Image: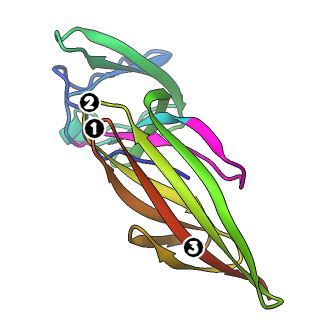
């Protein structure tokens, strides 16, 4: 399961890159997206913190728009007083202009997900249906929108769900879930898989 928050980062500095052995970026761009990622692919109940990622476009309107060499990217974000605080760092590959960059900067300690398989039924000799429950807990003081991405194998179909689902590709589907500040939301779905 992958969760993404489409709430933009807002700080007081502009993008800047230091072309040395590494890059440092300071964000002040509403096109930058803070993303929360959580991979929970086992049937057992799993409790895990969420990985925080940032995504932005390597475009001139973001004060970039140049080929970026492979290297380390350090990320800073302004605190309430406007002082730049180190958020994390990640490695990027060579990135041409006008392409997206996604940087993984660490774990969120205030957004948590738990995934459970609630039921499994064999349907005939070539298919099964299973019920899943994903509990999303937002401990932040702001609302988040979480993009929950679930894996699926074989020939599959979401039979029912508490939230609208959308097919991403042959092996995954997603739910866009609004989770209010300091609240919990549970996503429930049933998926049918056919293998012959």
Q: Position of residue 99 (x, y in %)?
A: 38, 48
Q: Are marks 1 and 2 in contact (CB under 8 Å)?
A: yes
Residue depicted at 55% across the width and 58% down the height: 133
Q: Position of residue 55 (x, y in %)?
A: 37, 41
Q: Is residue 188 left or right of residue 140?
A: right
Work out whether residue 15 or residue 174 is closer to the camera in this orientation and state it: 174
Work out whether residue 46 or residue 64 is closer to the camera in this orientation and state it: 46
Q: Which residue is mark 2?
A: 141
Q: Earlier in the sequence, mark 3 or mark 1?
A: 1
Q: Secondary structure beneath disc 1?
A: loop
Q: Position of residue 42 (x, y in %)?
A: 71, 52
Q: Which residue is mark 1?
A: 181
Q: Are marks 2 and 3 in contact (CB under 8 Å)?
A: no
Q: Image height check: is 56 above or below 2?
A: above
Q: Position of residue 56 (x, y in %)?
A: 33, 41
Q: Earlier in the sequence, mark 2 or mark 3?
A: 2
Q: Which residues are magenta?
A: 31-48
Label 3 Cα crowd, 10 Å radius (few <14 / some 14-19 / many 20+): some
Q: Is residue 32 magenta?
A: yes
Q: Secondary structure beneath disc 3?
A: strand
Q: Image height check: is 18 above or below 31?
A: above
Residue 72 visible in rendering: no
Q: CA distance from mark 3 to mark 1?
A: 27 Å
> Which residue is the extreme one toward the right?
125
Q: Image height check: is 63 above or below 16?
A: below
Residue 122 visible in rendering: yes
Residue depicted at 71% across the width and 77% down the height: 154
User: What number is the disc on residue 190?
Assistant: 3
Q: Is residue 153 left or right of residue 15?
A: right
Q: Is residue 119 magenta?
A: no
Work out whether residue 64 or residue 128 is closer to the camera in this orientation and state it: 128
Q: Where, by quadrant of the figure, is residue 172 drawn? A: bottom right
């Amino acid at each position: 399961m992958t969760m993404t928050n489409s709430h933009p980062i807002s700080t007081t500095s502009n993008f800047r890159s230091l072309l040395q052995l590494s890059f440092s970026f300071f964000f002040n761009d509403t096109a930058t997206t803070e993303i929360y990622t959580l991979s929970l692919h086992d049937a057992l109940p799993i409790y895990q913190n969420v990985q925080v990622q940032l995504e932005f476009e390597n475009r001139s309107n973001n004060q970039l728009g140049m080929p970026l060499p492979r290297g380390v990217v350090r990320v800073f974000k302004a605190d309430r007083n406007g002082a730049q605080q180190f958020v994390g760092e990640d490695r990027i590959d060579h990135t041409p202009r006008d392409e997206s960059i996604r940087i993984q900067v660490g774990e969120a300690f205030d957004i948590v997900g738990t995934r459970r398989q609630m039921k499994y039924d064999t349907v005939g000799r070539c298919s099964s249906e299973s019920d899943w429950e994903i509990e999303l807990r937002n401990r932040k003081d702001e609302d988040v929108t979480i993009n929950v991405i679930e894996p699926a194998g074989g020939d599959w179909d979401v039979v029912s769900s508490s939230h609208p689902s959308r097919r991403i590709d042959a092996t995954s589907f997603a739910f866009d879930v609004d989770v209010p500040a300091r609240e919990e939301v549970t996503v429930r779905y049933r998926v049918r898989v056919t293998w012959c």
